[in-house]
Image (cartoon, rainbow, N blue to C red):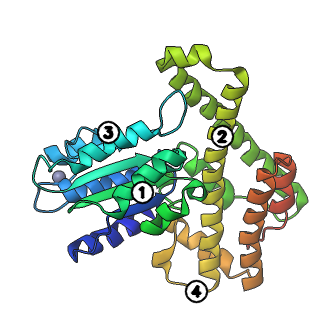
Amino acid sequence: MRVDEAFTFIKNAHAKNRLTSGLLIIGDVRGDAALLSTKILQLLFCTDMVKPCGSCTACQQVENKTAFDVTWIVPEKRSRQISISQIRERLIPAIMQTSLQGGWKSGVIIAADRMHQAAANCFLKTLEEPPQQTIFLLLSDSPQNLLPTIISRCQRIDVSNASTHSQVWWHNELLEMLADPGPAGPVSAMGLAARISALLAEVKKEAQKSVMAEYSEDEEAAINVSTDELDARIEARFRESRQTVLNTMQCWYRDLLAFTVGADSKTIHYPQYTELMQARAQNLTLAQALANIDAVDGIKRQLECNMSEPYVLSYWLDRVSNGLP
Ligand SMILES: [Zn+2]
């Protein structure tokens, strides 16, 4: 689901007074999932007539994470985990207090899958019987690591395939590569694979920079971290970003599929390519358009198994039909 679609859905539920007290937002916890959580909180706290306005004091406090009635919980720097004391001593007392502004109260758990077993069990009790006008937003890119009992208490909103990755530098570059893949055939697939590999190499450098920057803010952690741990964190950060790159590719081929079956153009991800997609879709069969989606699935699967990136990319991209005349 796209972020704006997800938000419209929440807004409607809110208008009908049917907002559930636990929302599990699946997606990039620094990207789309965070964006959606900010919009939801602004909707609840905004003091303007048309909510959320994004500019009133309340909206800004949400944006700056200084809102009185919202408690944000992030994994501790050293352990990268959410501890039981964060839940028991910070989150729960804040939620149990009456709202300072007489309205909603909220707890936002960023990377909720990093809750320790004990922390998760402690949180579960509050999630099961939340005080009035309370909403918990759980953000996670790995919901499979959450306790099933927590998942079952929350409404799931999946923005992990959202197309609003446009804020990342590589977004338009990647779309241009997909729009101009070169003629069909293995040589061209290798060329496209090489271009995407080069982009991924840049994405990896960026992951390295962002992890190193976090350690430079925290001297104590920097002294104690081992090279192995550092490498593992960079690799994990890179994999997150690589997943976003692959999701963008998948959205591209989904659009192509949508045009192939003549679906409503309102549901497409990249309307700026409508004309190009329409022309290419005419040269594609349904089976080919579906095989393209399978190809990206194949890339995702094999890269997860640590197979060689250029090989995996050129193998699958050679199986993609772009509908070029
Ligand atoms: Zn506002």
Disc count in the image? 4
* Residue designated by label 3: 90
Q: Are marks 2 and 4 in contact (CB under 8 Å)?
A: no
Q: Are marks 4 and 3 in contact (CB under 8 Å)?
A: no
Foreground label between 2 and 3: 3
Secondary structure state at the residue bearing disc 2: helix
**Along the line of sight, which residue is nearer the eye, 123 or 53?**
123
Secondary structure state at the residue bearing disc 1: helix
Q: Amino acid at mark 1?
A: Leu
For this view, does 45 lie left or right of residue 295? left
Badge 4, how many Cα within 10 Å: few under 14, some, many 20+?
A: few
Secondary structure state at the residue bearing disc 3: helix
**Along the line of sight, which residue is nearer the eye, 225 or 53?**
225
* Residue designated by label 4: 262
Badge 3, how many Cα within 10 Å: few under 14, some, many 20+?
A: some
Foreground label between 1 and 2: 1
Compared with 28, 283 (above or below) is: below
Compared with 60, 245 (above or below) is: below
Q: Give residue 52's position: percent from left, percent from top.
A: 21, 58
Mark toward the start of the polypeptide (2 vs 4)? 2
Q: Amino acid at mark 2?
A: Ala
Q: CA distance from mark 2 to mark 3?
A: 28 Å
Mark toward the start of the polypeptide (1 vs 2)? 1
Residue drawn at 38 percent across, 43 percent down: 87
Q: Are marks 3 and 1 in contact (CB under 8 Å)?
A: no
Compared with 240, 21 (above or below) is: below
Q: CA distance from mark 1 to mark 2?
A: 28 Å
Mark toward the start of the polypeptide (2 vs 3)? 3
